[in-house]
Image (cartoon, grey):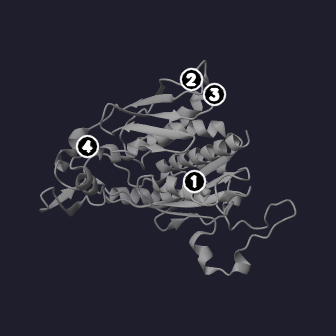
């Protein structure tokens, strides 16, 4: 498996499996001299970790990060930053019925067909536990580009949507409820829906909206490294993501040019922002906003038809501890990947000005 790295100048390489001893990573290209807020990094992990509420998986993992290199006296040294997160609450026996059976809509079948071998315990390398590594790296990236504010939040669960424009939301309320929706009324409806779905032994999907504010003009390239393309790649790399749209997105295809064009003000800002803060692949200084769609979690607690490694029809029923809706725990992951992309492109711009 060759592709375990993400980024250009700021590159993150990760390792580990959900039921192995540990997961972790190495961050290359991080500048020297940044004073690190370790509590802030751990808090980001706490936002993602399992077992934090009644509407997520009840696996209990402290997800405590231990830094191994690249730091001295609380500051980055400019060398590779190595870190590890120990796995402490694996229940591999929950997957004993999966040894040669492929779970529907998981990576089991494709992984086995590609490599001829797989870790059936929770998906191994393809497990969403990998994203804890991204949150560590993203938390560091946030501190590198601290002038940029990145806020993600749950904007829909199933058919329940938050239809208030993000400009009218108070992002400080996102963490005030377990579904991470900054509108109390919508949050209550979402939480009730997830509890109903969980009780039925089923799962449900949703959408996360992310807003990046105070982004400088000039991040991104006009051809193959367009900023929105890199953001899309980052988001579509997250487990269970099935869709990405920025700015006006698909709704823009229904508009006329006279309606969609963002007319300039004298200072270079625009009167509207249907471009989503990116034009020609390059940030224009306006807010960058986008939506990320998550499918329902594939593991459900009812019997389904499937096949085994001998291509024989059989049945499987989900066991163990799984999220009825992955969206609330994915909010910090979205923010982390956004921070990694923006920090990487911020560094690329900085090198060109030397």
226 vs 69: above or below: below
Mark 3 or 4, nearer chain start: 3
Q: Name the residue at 55% across, 51% down.
A: 180
Residues under numbered marks 3 and 1 in contact, where contact means CB atoms less than 8 Å apart: no
229 vs 29: above or below: below
Mark 4 or 2, nearer chain start: 2
Question: How packed is label 4: few (under 14 Cα within 10 Å), some, or many (20 or more)?
Answer: many
Q: Which residue is mark 3?
A: 32
Is residue 160 toward the left or the right of residue 51 in the image?
right
Q: Which residue is mark 2?
A: 71
- Quadrant location of the N terminus? top left
Residue 103 position by quadrant = bottom left
Q: Is residue 254 visible?
A: yes
Q: Secondary structure at mark 3?
A: loop
Mark 1 or 4, nearer chain start: 4
Residue 259's x, y, as percent? Answer: 72, 78
Q: CA distance from mark 4 to mark 2?
A: 34 Å
């Amino acid at each position: 498996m060759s592709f375990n790295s993400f980024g250009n100048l700021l590159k993150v390489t990760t390792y580990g499996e959900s039921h192995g001893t540990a997961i972790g990573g190495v961050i290359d290209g991080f500048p020297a001299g940044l004073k690190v807020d370790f509590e802030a990094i751990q808090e980001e992990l706490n936002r993602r970790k399992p077992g934090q509420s009644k509407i997520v998986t009840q696996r209990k993992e402290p997800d405590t990060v231990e830094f191994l290199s690249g730091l001295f006296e609380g500051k980055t040294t400019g060398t590779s930053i190595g870190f590890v997160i120990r796995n402490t609450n694996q229940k591999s026996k929950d997957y004993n019925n999966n040894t040669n059976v492929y779970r529907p809509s998981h990576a089991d079948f494709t992984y086995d067909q590609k490599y001829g071998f797989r870790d059936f315990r929770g998906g191994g390398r393809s497990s969403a536990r990998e994203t804890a590594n991204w949150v560590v790296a993203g938390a560091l990236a946030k501190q590198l580009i601290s002038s940029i504010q990145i806020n993600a939040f749950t904007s829909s669960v199933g058919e329940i949507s938050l239809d208030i424009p993000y400009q009218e939301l108070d992002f400080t309320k996102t963490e005030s409820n377990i579904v991470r929706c900054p509108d109390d009324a919508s949050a209550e409806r979402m939480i009730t829906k997830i509890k109903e779905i969980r009780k039925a032994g089923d799962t449900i999907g949703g959408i996360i909206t992310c807003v990046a504010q105070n982004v400088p003009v000039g991040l991104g390239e006009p051809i193959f490294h367009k900023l929105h393309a890199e953001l899309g790649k980052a988001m579509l790399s997250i487990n269970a993501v099935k869709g990405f749209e920025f700015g006006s997105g698909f709704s823009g295809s229904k508009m006329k040019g006279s309606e969609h064009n963002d007319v300039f003000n004298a200072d270079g800002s625009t009167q509207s922002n249907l471009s989503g803060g990116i034009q020609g692949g390059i940030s224009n200084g306006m807010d960058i906003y986008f939506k990320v769609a998550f499918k329902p979690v594939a593991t459900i607690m009812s019997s389904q038809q499937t096949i085994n490694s001998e291509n024989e029809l059989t049945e499987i029923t989900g066991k163990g501890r799984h999220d009825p809706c992955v969206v609330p725990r994915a909010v910090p992951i979205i923010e982390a990947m956004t921070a990694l992309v923006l920090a990487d492109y911020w560094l690329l711009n900085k090198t060109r000005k030397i």
